[in-house]
Image (tube, helix red, strand yellow):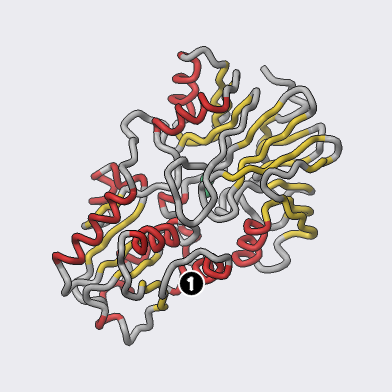
Amino acid sequence: MADPHLLTPTPAGLYCPAGDFYIDPVRATPRALITHGHADHARAGHGSVLATRQTLDIMALRYGENFCVTRQIATYGKTMNVNGVEVTFHPAGHVLGSAQICVCDGKKRIVVSGDYKRERDPTCPPFEPIRCDIFISEATFALPVFRHPDSRREVGKLLSSLALFPERAHLVGAYSLGKAQRMMALVREAGWDKPIWIHGAVEKITDYYMREGVDLGEIRKVTAAERPKLAGQIVLCPPSAIQDVWSRKFPDPVAAFASGWMRVRARARQRGVELPLIVSDHADWDDLCATIGETQCSELWVTHGEADALAHWASTIGLRAKPLHLVGYGDEEEAPGDEAAA
Ligand SMILES: [Zn+2]
Ligand SMILES: [Zn+2]
């Protein structure tokens, strides 16, 4: 196993004793390196935070300007020295600003990938495989049953439904950071040129993406008075809103939900989703396995999700592998309750 002085799992998260910092800690710590802005990775209350500029901006939008004492910007590909440890951020392809964090002591190189995906996403730079000794991966969809379809096919289903039911509003539940904006961009690529309507909870992050130069076309916030008039329109909202009283004022709404979990029909039914769209910001089984191969790592650590399954697979191809089962990391595609705050 690796030298625990470079990185070691602790109850607060992955800790680097040599550099005295944590990566994505789940508790307030003196020095945190943050992979991306989702709430289970990026928490308020740290002393100093090192992250990409966009992740820092997103944390400030969600938690207020005083989310930490001092901030430091990490630039993709630029190596920094943190208390004698080399630290480099690389794109993770997950959401705007998302990064893998590579730590190196001159001998061993460990890559903490955070959350990541390999499918093309017009709203953020693509994941870059980084050669390393130890690769640390999430395992949200690490079962062979999870093979995400092409997201263009899923967006095609949405546009077909709009063509078929022009008298119905199409409410698309999507996580407010990343997934909602990716859906907007995909819908534009598919040729949809009408305004895209949004729920208030999606507004702040969507505005930020647009300020950062992500082209989403015309976006309009839905007002109460407009709801009954939105037949044949696309409305992006937090997943919780599709079952909310909020949704009832729309003309005969079609409830859609964009998530990797929509592969599981029972989940779609449970949530009252009429139009499941399998669009995920996490790597599926094939992409997890391919990515682990591309890093040429000799050892795999698995943070959360189907950790045992992925670690077992890695051991069958000759890697040393250990499931960490880190506590405190959820899955934003499951649509937890922090939506309203986002
Ligand atoms: Zn995430
Ligand atoms: Zn996560």
Q: Residues within 10 Å of mark 1 (few under 14, many from 20)?
A: many
Q: Residue at x 31, y 59 (%)?
A: 190
| Amino acid type, residue under disc 1 in the picture | Glu
Q: Residue at x 73, y 44 (%)?
A: 78
- Which residue is labeled 1 in the image? 203
Total marks in image: 1
* Residue 7, placed above or below residue 48: above
Query: Residue 274 versus residue 127: which sits nearer the camera?
Result: 127
Q: Secondary structure at mark 1?
A: helix
Quick check: is the Cβ at mark 1 less than 8 Å away from ligand 1? Answer: no
Residue 24 shows up from this direction: yes
Q: Is residue 5 left or right of residue 143?
A: right
> What x and y, as percent, mark residue 25?
67, 44
> What x and y, as percent, mark residue 162?
20, 66
Q: Quarter holding the N terminus?
A: top right
Q: Is residue 230 left or right of residue 339?
A: left
> What x and y, as percent, mark residue 6?
75, 29
Q: Residue at x 72, y 50 (%)?
A: 74
* Residue 256, placed above or below residue 168: above
**Quarter occupied by residue 179:** bottom left
Query: Residue 52 versus residue 188: which sits nearer the camera?
Result: 188
Q: Is residue 130 left or right of residue 193?
A: right
**Which residue of the protein is positioned furthest toward the bottom in this rendering?**
225
Residue 341 shows up from this direction: no
Q: Is residue 17 left or right of residue 164?
A: right
**Which residue of the protein is positioned furthest toward the left in this rendering?**
164
> What x and y, as percent, mark residue 134?
63, 25
